[in-house]
Image (cartoon, helix red, strand yellow):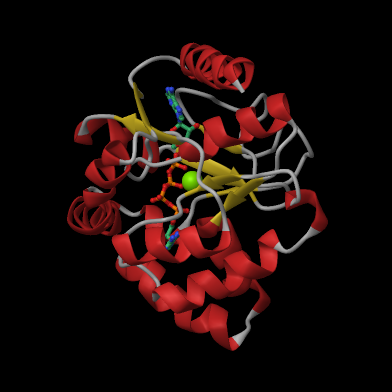
Amino acid sequence: MLGPPGSGKGTQAKFIAKKFGLPQISTGDLLRAAVKSGSELGQLAQEYIDAGNLVPDQLVLKLLKIRISKRDCNTGFILDGYPRNLQQAKDLEKIANVTLVILIELNQSTLVRRITGRRTCKKCGAIFHVDFNPPNIQGICDICSGELYQRTDDKEETVIKRLETYKRQTEPLIEYYRDLGLLEPISGDGTIEEIQGELDHIISSRIEKG
Ligand code: AP5
Ligand code: MG
């Protein structure tokens, strides 16, 4: 899943994961878990995350390799937020076979509104939005009753930096995957359900074609 911060990668990757029985691997989530654990790697990662920069490639690759070596990844997986630059795309080719790249496109003002209103469950990682996808009880996760929180990198000034990082480092991947014939761009400007429907159609027809 390729797309700028706040475009809905996590929201939609979770849907696809459930629907098609594949694990969702968000490198952002892996990094946040490392930060939470207090490990040296996590402490290093936090500085980059809070500055809106990419965490060094080797560090992210290390976490990714550990994750995809788990048994649930044997038949495939959905990457959410990886790769984010050309070096990572090359690294990925050495460890996995990329079959489809979904690009979610969305304008900047909508991205900022989506990110600043996002609330995430501390316990299960479910994603909500105060206006667009509110939980039944404010501050409480609908799924596991965990506490909802706002990510430390979701402050407006960090969000602007993340958007710049995306433009400079990640956007070149659009051409890269288009040239490889793997890119499937979709508009992120619809309801969550509309976009789910579109993704369901794209992936189901790929599966039918084999
Ligand atoms: P990461 O956690 O991946 O953040 P991101 O790419 O900035 O993307 P987000 O998670 O903010 O947005 P999303 O597209 O998942 O949107 P969501 O579904 O939540 O990375 C964080 C940091 O970690 C990076 O800045 C970097 O430092 C580091 N990092 C991660 N991967 C790395 C890598 N590979 N290499 C190096 N560093 C790395 O939706 C957003 C909000 O909108 C939610 O509130 C949701 O409810 C709402 N929403 C979703 N869809 C809709 C809709 N259709 N209509 C209305 N609201 C919607
Ligand atoms: Mg995400």
Q: Which residue is located at x 56 percent, y 14 percent?
A: 205
Give the mark count: 0
* 82 lies left or right of 166: right
Residue found at the very far front of the displayed protein: 210
Answer above or below: position of 50 versus 19: below
Q: Is residue 169 left or right of residue 19?
A: left
Residue most extreme to the bottom: 40
Tell me what residue is drawn at x 63 percent, y 84 percent.
39
State the image coordinates of residue 133 (x, y, percent, origin top left).
53, 24
**Quarter of the view holding residue 71:** bottom right
Can residue 92 be seen here? The reply is: yes
| Spot occupied by residue 22 in the image (x, y as percentages of width and height) | 71, 38
For the point 57% across and 75% down, the residue is: 62
x, y (%) of residue 175? 22, 42
Q: Is residue 128 visible?
A: no
Viewer-nearest residue: 113 or 77: 77
Is the residue 170 above or below the residue 204 in the image?
A: below
The residue at 39%/42% (across/down) is 2
The correct choice, above or below, for 194 with respect to 23 in the image is: above
When asked about the image quadrant of residue 91, the answer is bottom left
Query: What x and y, as percent, mark residue 171?
Result: 23, 48
In the rendered image, the quadrant that contains the C terminus is top right
Q: Is residue 165 left or right of residue 55?
A: left
